[in-house]
Image (cartoon, rainbow, N blue to C red):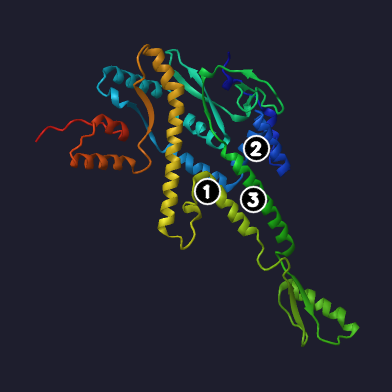
Amino acid sequence: MKMIALQKNHGWRDAYNPLRGLNLSRLTALQEAGERGQYADLQWLYYYMERSDAMIHSVIQRRRAALLSLDWDIRIVSQAQHDPRAQQQADFLRMAYDNIDNFREAVSFLFTGFFRGFAHLEKHWAANGLIERLEPVEQWFWLRDGLFGDWEYNAGANPGTLRGEPIESADFIIHETAALDRILSVLYLRKNLSQRDWDSFLSVYGIPAIFLVGPPNVPEDKQKEYQTIAEQILSDGRGFLPHESDIKFVNGGGDKPPFHDQIKYLDEQITIAATGGLLTMLAEAGSGTLAGGAHQDTFLQIAKSDAVTLAGVLQNAIDVPLLQQHFPGQPVQAYFEFSPNLTQETRQVVQDALLLKAAGLEVKPEEISEKTGYSLTQSPER
């Protein structure tokens, strides 16, 4: 079958903005269609939404940056550190990953699955039997028969399509998870409705109405004269008023409209949902470094979870099938992993090993090597 990534066609969607006229009923209908496996319009909405809201864009970029800042390595399971076959597998996997010319871009796209619920990369095989490229196939090209049906390709990204072209799952890397955008889309809609109401409020009350009160007992023939004076004064903001005149400002709509507080609350909910904490982008005065540090630790835990999750996806879709093909009959003894760790876990492992040694207990160097990523050798006795 011809590669799916080379036959994508959705030209009509380029002229379709899913945010135009979006309301809660429309959003609910799209989400319900997604539960039935019809993703075209829903994923097109997610794509636009992620590029249209500053806070959503920021939290996505922050999590993506944490993942892409990591290097990667091939590890050997601790039980096989001294098995020459394990080193052969590790060398082969390192060559296989080095052979993928767009690996960083592929990982960046695979990351979008955390927000959109799934992501597909199509394997492009080279003549040597290794993967040459991992081509993204965007989320709006996919459908399935129900929530747990097999993945099928929707060539035109057409809405309402019930069945598509079956795929060979072995030719794809598929990342599936709960879609954060399902939560964020509701917050996004509420935030935009609040912003629209705020704009309407400002158009009415942003510039307060001004009335000039003339002196008492003004003759009728003088009222038109005072009206002309008032208009001249308001036109440039200065002038002379008759004795006992006054100016009244009409500040309707209340002293403190709720729109700013509501938008701030929704931004906090977006950040909490996407990063697990308010982080420094929403840090409040007086919150102190303790709360900020706790939020940062939570974010690092989520970022590490992203790395571990995607590493597991790559292991199942690349490591296992390639090793089974090129090392038949051997157990899988090497695997891909992002490194180094995002937290102080590496330092903690070393400290624990030293404490155990001080207590008279030994930790095998290969186990420390697997957990820290350090290549360890036995130091000569002094």
User: Which mark, residue 45?
Assistant: 2
Q: Which residue is pictured at 38% across the width and 30% down the height?
A: 337
Badge 3 crowding class, 10 Å Cα cut-off, few under 14, some 14 to 19, many 20 or more, is many
The residue that mark 3 highlights is 191
Q: Which residue is pictured at 23% across the width and 34% down the height?
A: 363
Q: Which residue is pictured at 90% across the width and 83% down the height?
A: 221
Does 155 appear above or below 262? above
User: Which mark, residue 272?
Assistant: 1
Q: How far apart are marks 2 and 1 (CA)?
A: 22 Å
Discs 2, 3 touching: Cβ within 8 Å:
no
Q: What element carries label 1?
A: helix
Q: How far apart are marks 2 and 3 (CA)?
A: 16 Å
Q: On the image, which quarter does residue 181 sit in?
A: top right
> Relative to the observer, which residue lies in front, 91 or 314?
314
- Residue 302 image offset from top left, x and y in percent: 45, 41
Q: What element carries label 3?
A: helix
- Residue 377 image offset from top left, x and y in percent: 20, 30
Q: How far apart are marks 3 and 1 (CA)?
A: 15 Å
Badge 2 crowding class, 10 Å Cα cut-off, few under 14, some 14 to 19, many 20 or more, is many
Q: Earlier in the sequence, mark 3 or mark 1?
A: 3
Q: On the image, which quarter does residue 176 sit in?
A: top right
Horizontally, residue 11 falls left or right of residue 88, namely right
- Name which residue type carries label 3: Lys
